[in-house]
Image (tube, helix red, strand yellow):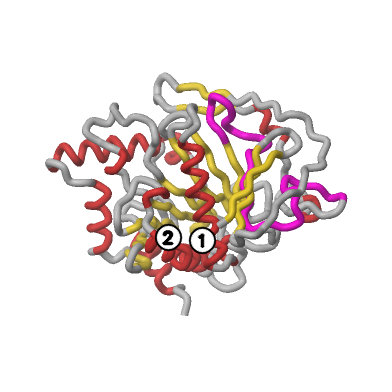
Amino acid sequence: MKKTSTRLADGRELIYYDSRDDTVRDAVDRRPLDRTVTTSEVRRDPLLGDAVAIASHRQGRIYHPPADECPLCPSEGDRLSEIPDSSYDVAVFENRFPSLAGDSGRCEVVCFTSNHDASFADLTEEQAALVLEAWTDRTAELSHLPAVEQVFCFENRGAEIGVTLGHPHGQIYAYPFTTPRTALMLRSLAAHKEATGGENLFDAVLERELADERVVLETEHWVAFVPFSAHWPYEVHLYPRRRVPDLLGLDEDARTEFPKVYLELLRRFDRIFGEGEPPTPYISAWHQAPFGTLEEFDGVVREDFALHLELFTIRRTSGKLKFLAGSESGMNVFINDVPPETAAQRLREVASS
């Protein structure tokens, strides 16, 4: 992999990740852009104890542009985009309309391919491996920023999810705090460790799932399963068999095997609702240990956390979505219409031949 860092016209960082070591990236952003001005602010909820990012400048972000005006496609002639070069393998740049910025963290866009009409599931294993390298490198780089405590790599796909740009891409949020969801995991981890005299909760969950009927896919280095208490109609958790706290901890064998496993899961998601259905909307989210102190979580260290990916869709059946209504949005109590065992069986049925 070759990494090339440059700057866009307004000063934002752009990084190319290329599979060929001899690739030269010297194109200049020719757009007349002013410096980006953000108004991001993180506020704490005194009752819930969680954080809310206030980012009013995002009201002006680009919304469903036509394909010939896509800001994530390579620049061509007088059609100038966020990518000055005429092609790319993987490109990462600072978001022009970030939810988090400055002392409030950082947001980046990850373009998986220059092909506007593709999706992650259409990538080759070599291309998917390069995206993994980019995620890992960005996690390492962002973890060193003074304001950053946790790095979150994710992909939203589909208009039903709220995606405003159709080009295949994901994002990275570098938070200045430990996110509420991760804090819940860490508290459960600490409580289980104390109650059992040192047993790791992630290890116990994985062992339980391996012995049950919800396993979707197993390989030498990865396990994918529908969790016992799945929140979403179709939800898969992907774990490396060897527990590591973040993407940096994956060994070479796990990295080599990941593209094949992940692409298979994404392709199954596109088949679960049958032929003729539009692409399945989904969220794919990497959960990594925070890089900040874990003193508030008694007895827990970073190495106790288990890196894992959660992949889920809001589509519950053909033509119907799972909405977060009163119980989910008002009380954070999920009601799932699809039994996890049924979801796992369906995801096994649509395996590649």
Q: Position of residue 212 (x, y in %)?
A: 25, 64
As drawn, which residue projects farthest toward the front? 22
Magenta-span inclusion, residue 86: yes
Cα–Cα span, label 1 and label 2: 7 Å
As drawn, which residue projects farthest toward the top? 46
Q: Nearer the viewer, residue 80 or 167?
A: 80
Q: Main secondary structure of the magenta part?
A: loop
Left or right of 216 in this view: 272: right
Q: Given contact means CB atoms under 8 Å apart, are the residues at marks 1 and 2 in contact?
A: yes
Q: Residue at x 24, y 52 (%)?
A: 203
- Mark 1 highlights which residue? 129
Element type at mark 2: helix
| Residue 345 shows in this picture | yes
Q: Nearer the viewer, residue 192 or 200?
A: 200
Disc 2 packing (10 Å; few <14; some 14–19; many ≥20): some
| Residue 335 shows in this picture | no
1 or 2: tag closer to the N-terminus: 1
Q: Amino acid at mark 2?
A: Arg
The mark total stands at 2
Query: For residue 291, what is the image quadrant?
Result: top left
Q: Is residue 262 above or below residue 203?
A: below
Magenta segment boundaries in residue numbering = 78-106
Q: Amino acid at mark 1?
A: Ala
Q: Residue at x 42, y 52 (%)?
A: 309
Q: Nearer the viewer, residue 166 or 198?
A: 198
Q: Is residue 330 above or below residue 283?
A: above
Left or right of 96 in this view: 243: left
Q: Position of residue 42 (x, y in %)?
A: 52, 24
Element type at mark 1: helix
